[in-house]
């Protein structure tokens, strides 16, 4: 009913012939008012001006040939050996399935971490990030943070607000107090892919190799990621 | 006399216009439409999270949504069993008891072990997809956008129907005018070309503790809803891409996809509607599939 009255009224108003400048202004105001009462705001599918447009329309980068370099190969081999150990340990604990019981999830993670730590009690920094591997990682990271992608990569690190003074250690549980700083996704295209059990994490200026199922630090490469106030070298 | 009649008509018109504006937006609630809510950065376990979830319950009386997209930072701080209870199971108990499903994405405060928590419906994966009616959802892990995930996304989008809505959700916004973090431009470099190529329609993200609707970018609609538990009051620095925003209280989104229209409403903790509208499903000129 209200809509009918409104429509009738709109019809009446449209029939009024403006006779002066003030009436013209009034008519314009009413027209704006009529538009403003559109029952539902239908959003136009037009593009707005892009925000801080980066170099867009670039396809996802392909893996650069440096991934086959000896240092990266050595890293990949050692990471694979770690995964073998992880799997052999995991086979000794009850398989984790999706569950409504957080106790089972937390318990599984703790047991797995404890057993892996015991299985590689003598593990030390550099076991997987070997000197040769570090050389290749350093090249890839330097290239990422100095090349055309640099502003975006730096922004990704900045977004994570990394704590400058935190350094994790091998066989340490990743602390719940430290949110993840994303490793720049364009950097992930330049460094070796990891098996599902492992992930790279940026912690402070360190590149950390994390066992994601056990939430355990597997290895660290110190002071390699440039963060504010750090040159990463 | 004629002039008085006109003023009378104008007065009546303005009254009606005001009255109509108050309830100008209505969900169509069509049979078989896809109805959901979206929340982000909620897992604090603090009072505002509980109050926001209570408001979701209230809204559900009139808008019976079936599931919720959780846009990351589902659990802040500790991940002990007590944390799962305090920061998720308890605040959303009424919704969970009513059979509302949650589909979670991982944020930078989330432990990867959350993917094994059944109520998050991640089935042990940190990225996954699911279908509801004519909508295909893609949950991504924006903490770790490695080549494997990108390959997976492209294959999933390629195999999705050309007449389906394609909605991606993840934690870090590709476009944002918030003061704290700003847009994840590095992520955008990799994801946006894929979204455009395969005709993604809408993207939901969190991370910034505000609400923002961004003007379409390359034809794609972007929403940031990261204030369902956390809040950064005054954290939105409106820019030339901001279509609408809200940064003075917690909020969540309600969405109904009915055929080729997506109706949305953003509601504050106190029940105030702070944004609403309708999106027409975009035609995908560059879609791979005919």
Image (tube, coloured by chain):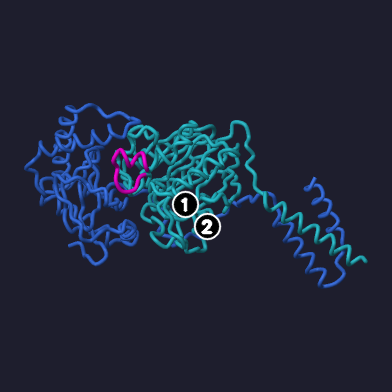
Chain colours: A blue, B cyan
In this picture, is B168 found above or below B130?
below
Q: Is residue B81 left or right of residue A57?
A: left
Looking at the rendering, in which quadrant would you find the N terminus of chain A?
top right
Which class describes the residues within 10 Å of circle 1: few (<14), some (14-19), or many (20+)?
many
Label 1 marks a residue whose chain is: B
In this picture, is B269 found above or below B64?
below
Q: Residue B283 placed where, x, y %?
A: 57, 44
Kindly identify the residue that appears in the image at 21 percent across and 41 percent down.
A211
Q: SS of the residue at dot 1?
A: strand
Q: Are marks 2 and 1 on the same chain?
A: yes
- In the foreground, B8 or B34: B8
Q: Is residue B9 left or right of residue B89?
A: right
Q: Residue A80 placed where, x, y %?
A: 17, 37
Which class describes the residues within 10 Å of circle 2: few (<14), some (14-19), or many (20+)?
many
For disc 1, the marked residue is: B224
In this picture, is B54 found above or below B244?
above
Q: Which mark is residue B151?
A: none
Kindly identify the residue that appears in the image at 79 percent across and 64 percent down.
A27
> Does the magenta segment cover residue A77?
no
- In the foreground, B4 or A23: B4
Segment colored magenta: B75-86
Q: Residue A149 placed where, x, y %?
A: 33, 59
Q: Which mark is residue B245?
A: 2
Callout 2 touching callout 1 (CB < 8 Å): no
Residue furthest to the left in view is A122
Q: CA distance from mark 2 to mark 1?
A: 9 Å
Asked where in the image residue A20 lies, by quadrant, the reply is bottom right
> Does the magenta segment cover residue B76?
yes
Looking at the rendering, in which quadrant would you find the C terminus of chain A?
bottom left
Q: SS of the residue at dot 2?
A: strand
């Amino acid at each position: 009913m209200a809509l009918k009255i409104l429509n009738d009224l709109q019809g009446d108003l449209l029939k009024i012939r403006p006779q002066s400048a003030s009436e013209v202004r009034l008519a314009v105001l009413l027209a704006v008012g009529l538009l403003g009462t559109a029952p539902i705001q239908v959003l136009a599918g037009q593009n707005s001006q892009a925000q801080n447009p980066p170099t867009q329309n670039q396809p996802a980068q392909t893996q650069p040939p440096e991934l086959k370099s000896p240092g990266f190969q050595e890293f990949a081999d050692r990471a694979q050996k770690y995964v073998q150990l992880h799997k052999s340990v995991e086979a000794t604990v009850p398989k984790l399935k999706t569950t409504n019981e957080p106790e089972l999830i937390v318990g599984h993670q703790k047991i797995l971490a404890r057993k892996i730590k015991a299985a590689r009690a003598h593990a030390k920094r550099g076991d997987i990030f070997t000197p040769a591997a570090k050389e290749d990682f350093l090249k890839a990271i330097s290239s990422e943070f100095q090349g055309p992608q640099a502003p975006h990569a730096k922004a990704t690190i900045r977004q994570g607000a990394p704590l400058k003074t935190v350094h994790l250690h091998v066989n340490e549980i990743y602390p719940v107090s430290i949110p993840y700083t994303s490793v720049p996704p364009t950097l992930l295209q330049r460094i070796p892919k990891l098996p599902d059990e492992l992930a790279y994490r940026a912690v402070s200026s360190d590149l950390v190799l994390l066992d994601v199922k056990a939430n355990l630090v597997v290895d660290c490469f110190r002071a390699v990621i440039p963060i504010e106030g750090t040159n990463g070298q | 006399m004629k002039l008085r009649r006109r003023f009378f008509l104008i007065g009546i018109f303005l009254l009606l216009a005001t009255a109509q504006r108050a309830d100008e937006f209505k969900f169509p609630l069509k049979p078989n439409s896809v109805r959901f809510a979206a929340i982000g950065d909620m897992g604090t376990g603090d009072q505002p999270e509980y109050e926001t979830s209570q408001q979701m319950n209230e809204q559900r009386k009139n808008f019976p949504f079936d599931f919720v997209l959780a846009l990351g930072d589902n659990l802040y701080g500790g991940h002990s069993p007590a944390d799962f209870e305090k920061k998720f199971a308890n605040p959303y108990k009424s919704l969970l008891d009513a059979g509302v499903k949650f589909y979670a994405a991982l944020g930078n405060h989330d432990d990867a072990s959350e993917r094994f928590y059944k109520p998050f419906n991640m089935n042990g994966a940190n990225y996954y997809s699911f279908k509801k009616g004519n909508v295909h959802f893609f949950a991504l892990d924006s903490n770790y956008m490695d080549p494997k995930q990108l390959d997976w996304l492209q294959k999933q989008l390629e195999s999705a129907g050309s007449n389906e809505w394609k909605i991606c959700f993840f934690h870090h916004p590709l476009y944002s005018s918030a003061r704290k973090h700003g847009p994840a431009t590095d992520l955008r470099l990799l994801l946006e070309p894929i979204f455009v190529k395969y005709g993604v329609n809408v993207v939901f993200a969190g991370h910034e503790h505000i609400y923002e609707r961004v003007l379409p970018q390359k034809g794609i609609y972007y929403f940031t809803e990261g204030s369902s538990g956390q809040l950064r009051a005054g954290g939105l620095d409106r820019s030339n891409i901001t279509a609408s925003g809200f940064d003075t209280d917690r909020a969540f989104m309600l969405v109904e996809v009915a055929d080729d229209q997506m109706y949305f409403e953003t509601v504050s903790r106190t029940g105030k509607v702070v944004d609403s509208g309708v999106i027409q499903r975009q035609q995908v000129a560059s879609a791979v599939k005919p």
